[in-house]
Amino acid sequence: TFIKETRRRGYALRCRQHIYDGRTDSVAVPIRAGTRVLGAIGFVGIASAITGQELADRHLTSLMAARDKIEADVQTLKI
């Protein structure tokens, strides 16, 4: 299923075939504190210009680095 595949990959792809209007695609990674998911960060692109997979290919490394920084900063907070 979509959720199982997303968990296996460690990031989410939203592609035009999965959304109602088909105008955008996106890639996102979760921000976690331990086992809790606090949120997500991602990139959105115009589907006619870039696919979700292309967004992942170009930006996933940067997204994961930003996520890692945020998660490290969150560890210093008392939440």
Image (cartoon, grey):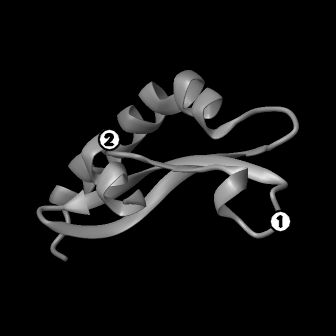
Residue visible at 77% across and 52% down? 24
Sequence-first disc among 2 and 1: 2
User: How many discs appear?
Assistant: 2
Residue 25 lies, in percent from the top left, at: 70, 48
Residue visible at 62% across and 32% down? 55
Label 2, secondary structure: give it. Answer: helix
Kind of residue at badge 2: Arg
Front residue (pair 70, 44): 44
Residue 2 placement: quadrant = bottom left
Residue 58 lies, in percent from the top left, at: 58, 22
Q: Classify residue 75 as left or right of residue 24.
A: left
Residue visible at 64% across and 60% down? 18
Q: Which residue is mark 1?
A: 21
Q: Which residue is mark 2?
A: 9
In space, the residues marked 2 and 1 are separated at their CA atoms by: 25 Å
Q: Residue furthest top?
A: 58
Residue visible at 70% across and 64% down? 19
Q: Quadrant of the N terminus?
A: bottom left
Q: Classify residue 50 as left or right of residue 5.
A: right
Asked if residue 2 is positioned above or below residue 13 in the image, the reply reads below
Q: Quadrant of the C terminus?
A: bottom left
